[in-house]
Image (tube, rainbow, N blue to C red):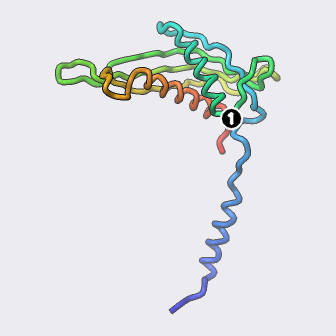
Amino acid sequence: MHRPFGIFAVSILLMLASACGIYSTKGRTAGDIKKIAVPNLSNETAQPDIETEITTNLRSGLIKDNTLKVVAENEADAVLEGTVIEYRNVPFTFNADLQAEQYRLMIGLNVSLFNPKDNTYIWKDRRIDAHSDYYLETTTDRTYDRALEEVYKDIVEGILNATTQEW
């Protein structure tokens, strides 16, 4: 026996059709932030030059993402200020002889986003942490350099998430 659509089924179809119109594709950026400056970070860790590496990777990652345009400070809608506050490279797993097999690389930043147009902070003192594991064995692709790349990628993503609005 074949029944026609009931009022309940039609109501559900109408709700589903109208729900599709709620989604918005407007920009990911918070407010009027379209251009960002990324001056050199400072470093409170004992790891030499890590702030330079992270700053370079932040700029490259933001350029690659293309959500925000990376510009000089005098052209920016927002300026990212930050400090590398943690760099740890520690044994993470051990073999039966208590020799380290796997290491964990951890980097932490304290960052703020400053609005130079009205001299206020958009957000301030956010902690961005990232980590990745790697092996000392060269027979695996989980190397220190690969772990460092992943950490940098996660830091960029954390800053983008802090800077962009929910959508």
Q: Residue furthest bottom?
A: 1
Q: Quadrant of the C terminus?
A: top right
User: Residue 72: x percent and y percent?
Assistant: 75, 18
* Whether residue 99 is visible: yes
Q: Which residue is mark 1?
A: 67
Identify the residue shown where x is 37% and y is 28%: 141
User: Label 1 amino acid?
Assistant: Thr
Identify the residue shown where x is 42% and y is 27%: 132
Identify the residue shown where x is 58% and y is 12%: 52
* Whether residue 92 is visible: no
Depicted 153 relative to depicted 22: above or below = above
Identify the residue shown where x is 67% and y is 33%: 66
Compare residues 42 and 50 and report the one nearer the observer.
50
User: Residue 138: x percent and y percent?
Assistant: 32, 22
Q: Tell me: 54 left or right of 100.
A: right
Depicted 41 relative to depicted 118: above or below = above
- Look at the numbered disc 1 and give the secondary structure of its residue: loop
